[in-house]
Image (tube, rainbow, N blue to C red):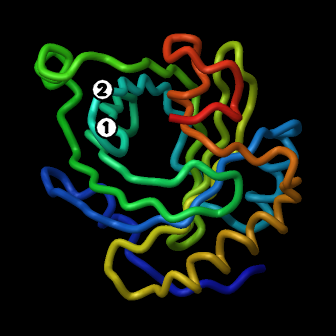
Amino acid sequence: MITIPSLQVAKISLKGRLVPHINIEIKARCPDPQRVRAILKQQNADFKGADLQIDTYFNVPQGRLKLRRGNIENSLIFYNRPDRAGPKEAQVILSPVRPDSQLKEVLTRALGVLATVEKEREIYFIGNVKFHIDALPGLGSFVEIEAIDTAGDISRAELLKQCKDYMDLLGIDKKDLVRCSYSDMVPACGADSENDSR
């Protein structure tokens, strides 16, 4: 089992608190989700549940701004992240929102909607590393790895090592790596494939 530093990952979801943090992360196509589930189970990953999520992306001059509505996660998320296929750093600011918030209507009027992404997401944690197994209608299955530092006490080098180690553990092939956001892959944003980027 991979050894990682301990971190209070609950800080990511403190109610009503603005939470800036750094991720080193990847997204990849997942030809065998059951295999990934089995490996995470072998690693004693903490399964948080299956979340039916609707992410609404809004027009912004830089980065990406999305409102996430789900049965587990409900957040307004702004992030800056380069579009490349390998592990990449994301600067993230996350603010929890109430499920019954009218924020979507306000942001739609103010900014306009760029894209809407619907997915079923399985959420797992091993320490400070978060894993997603995603199923998107018309796009297929994906896996994401996010090595997260919310407290500023894990170096970028260590986050990168965690991300790469778990890529190896899950057997993620370089050809399956995706460089861009789901918002660039759905038809609404005019992307032809996962290799398009904004």
Decide: marks 2, 1 in contact (CB < 8 A)?
A: yes
Give residue 125's position: percent from left, percent from top. 56, 61
If the image is split into quadrants, where does the N terminus sit? bottom right
- The kind of secondary structure element at disc 2 is strand
Which residue does the image show at 80% across and 50% down from the upper left?
36
Give residue 163's position: percent from left, percent from top. 66, 69
139 relative to 82 in the view: left or right: right
Amino acid type assigned to the residue bearing label 2 in the image: Phe
Give residue 114's position: percent from left, percent from top. 37, 20
172 relative to 140 in the view: left or right: right
Dividing the picture into quadrants, the one containing residue 87 is bottom right
The residue that label 1 is drawn on is 65
| Circle 2 Cα neighbour tier, 10 Å, few/some/many (<14 / 14–19 / ≥20) | many
Dividing the picture into quadrants, the one containing residue 146 is bottom right
Q: Is residue 8 above or below residue 196?
A: below
103 relative to 60 in the view: left or right: left
The first of marks 2 and 1 along the sequence is: 2
Which residue does the image show at 24% across and 16% down from the upper left?
112
Give residue 95's position: percent from left, percent from top. 21, 48
| Circle 1 Cα neighbour tier, 10 Å, few/some/many (<14 / 14–19 / ≥20) | many
Which residue does the image show at 58% across and 12% down from the upper left?
187
Amino acid type assigned to the residue bearing label 1 in the image: Leu
Circle number at residue 58: 2
Q: How many callouts does the rendering have?
A: 2
